[in-house]
Amino acid sequence: MIVASVSNLEKSYPTQDVFSNISFTINKGDKIGLIGNNGSGKSTLFNILTGEISKDFGKIHIPNDVSLGYLKQQLGLMSDKSIYDYCLEVFKDLIKLEENIRDLEIKMSGEKNPDKLNEIMIEYAKKSEEFEKQNGYSYKSEIRGVLIGMGFSEEDFSKEISLLSGGQKARVELACLLLEKPDLILLDEPTNHLDIKAINFLENFVKNFKGSVIVISHDRYFLDATVSKIFLMENGGLKIYDGDYTSFMAQRKKDLKVQNHLYKTQQKEIKRQEEIIDRLKNLGGSKRKRGISQSRSRQKLLDKMERVEKPDNLNGSINIRFTPRIISGVDVLSVDKLKKSYDKDIFEDISFNIYRNDRVAIIGENGVGKTTLFKIILNQERKDDGEIKLGSSVKVGYFDQEQKSLNTENTLFEEIREAYPDLTNYEIRSYLAKIMFYQDEVDKPINELSGGQRARISLLKLMLSDCNFILMDEPTNHLDIDSKEALEDALIAYEGTVLVISHDRYFLNKIAVKILDMHKDYIKEYLGNYDYYVEKLKEESLEDEKKPIMTQTQIKKEEKKKKLKRLEVKKIKEKIEKLEKESNTIDAKIHKLTEESLKEGFYDDEKKVIETFAKIKNLEEKKQRYQDRWLELSLELEDD
């Protein structure tokens, strides 16, 4: 089944031709990666498909019965609803149906006329069947599962959306889109605000989703895991490759090799023809008239020649090289039993060491405190406890994912001039050319730059700092794939030390020699890249399964040791208090239902009797679970 088809699509602006003659078909179940350098028109294509901007020419056909969902890269989500209530909006029709069913139940319990009761029961049966067909009994658990998959805790569910960060809002929007399950999903850089756990959740969703997905992404690992087709946008056109990202790259290299040869051969021929035309034009004497005529004929043939597009790899990419001015000592950074808290604990007991020439990646769930750790290292935030020590002759350079160090009122040229006043105008322009800003582009204000362009100027400032210890917070978020590869090569060649926060697993695989897996109360070291880390996790999981079977007493003692190691007394007390409140609430509900069962005429309605006592039983079982948990926590507290 075709869910969308595009034919001869064109779009341009007064100062730029975006793309032309784009054609493709999307079938049900297609998982497509849309890639291309920044500015190639990927988001523009999405906006045309959704009708947010108009096309200049071409045809788009999306059948009326095909639903379309779109997650933008830049979001403006504003709502005074809680996260959970906002997600409930996805199921508003289902909730309305549920309310109708409850109304019918009330009508049935009070209707004495057998004929009318029969009519109500028929309607009730129809609506109940429809409710079940739409998975009405599972939508609440589905919301819970998706929100947890997106990295929210159950305590977060009640948070007001207007108080969330940009990244959290993006995760809420993505959660709603996954809950909607439209026939065709368009995702624009969906992994930018996700931690690795949430990315894995999204990967599994996309792989198992029965509908179609087109994803704009520079996350090569994600593309390998999810797509079976690549749409490449370059030079104003679109090329289609079958397979995942790795397959695409292999075929792409072959194509570029052929295209390079054709392009260079044609350029030589064009140059030869132009030289002949110039000679013919400059013939003198009796040959002049004939020479001019022949030059015009040759020029016409040259003008009609179908030109081979200049391959992207000949257009160049950013050219950066990090070179430390001085060599640091062997011990670069020592962190011992570090603790930080705001209204609640962020992390504690964080310890690790970094040595000269290490390339270390810190990974962990969102909110675990990775960026806060960086700010403490940089003296931008104070620690609550523990020790941090930088080694001798260590000069730190920092890449901030939000690029807050950039003065948005400056032009590109002014930004470099301000940071490095000793550079000449020629040197500044030369450096800006290395990150692909040429001629008048250097006078462009920073507040007009895209995220990728701002990332490039931040990388240049870092390159010019001559530091020997680089800290990078999500450096690949806004970079296109060519720029990512240039950064990877620069970091591998770097003779200093690197500490990077990243959820880009392809990037981590290529540059990291050590992984630090950060949790709220410990950090664990893995001496390898990301694939090594994943393999070790699998081994650890298998080892846990192979451990000898212990007695129940031994198991309880072991579990108690682990819990006491990672749980504070304050947290245990809070959980106990919460369980007590929930138990009291259940008691009140049981009491109310019991009171109803004592009312006159209660046993006249058999259905109501069954439902009421089923509710009482469920509540009593729930209360027992709460009491068991309460007792378990109380014993832990006593032992402590």
Image (spheres, helix red, strand yellow):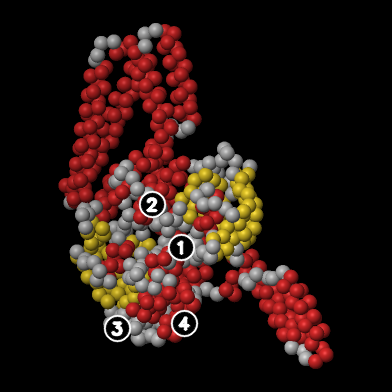
Specify which label sits upstream in the sequence, 2 or 3. Answer: 2
Mark 2 vs mark 3: in front: 2
Q: CA distance from mark 1 to mark 2?
A: 28 Å
Does residue 274 sit above or below 126 in this rendering?
Answer: below
- Residue at (26% x, 58% y) in the render: 346
Residue type at the position of mark 4: Ser
Please name the residue that numbered disc 4 is placed on.
430
Q: Which residue corresponds to the image point at 39% horizontal and 69% vertical from the top-left?
A: 446
Would residue 637 appear left or right of 148 to someone viewing this image? Answer: left
Distance Cα–Cα, label 1 vs label 4: 33 Å
Quadrant of the drawing holding the N terminus: top right
Q: Of the residues shown, which amino acid type is indicated by label 3?
A: Ser
C-alpha distance separating marks 4 and 3: 30 Å
Q: Earlier in the sequence, mark 1 or mark 4?
A: 4
Which quadrant would residue 586 be assigned to in this image? top left
State the residue lying farthest toward the bottom: 285
Give the alpha-carbon distance from disc 4 to disc 2, as whole Å. Answer: 37 Å
The amino acid on which the numbered mark 2 sits, given as a three-letter code, is Gly
Q: Are marks 1 and 4 in contact (CB under 8 Å)?
A: no
As drawn, is 440 to the left or to the right of 111? Answer: right
What secondary structure is found at the residue carrying circle 4? helix
Query: Closer to the camera, 395 or 307?
Result: 307
Identify the residue under disc 2.
76
Residue 256 visible: yes
> Mark 4 or mark 2: which comes first in sequence?
2
Which mark, by number, is residue 505? 1
Residue depth check, mark 1 versus mark 4: number of the one nearer the observer: 4
Q: Looking at the rendering, which quadrant does residue 370 occupy? A: bottom left
Query: Which mark is first along the chain, 2 or 1?
Result: 2
Observer-nearest of 149 and 576: 149
Do the numbered discs 1 and 2 sit on residues whose CB atoms are within 8 Å?
no
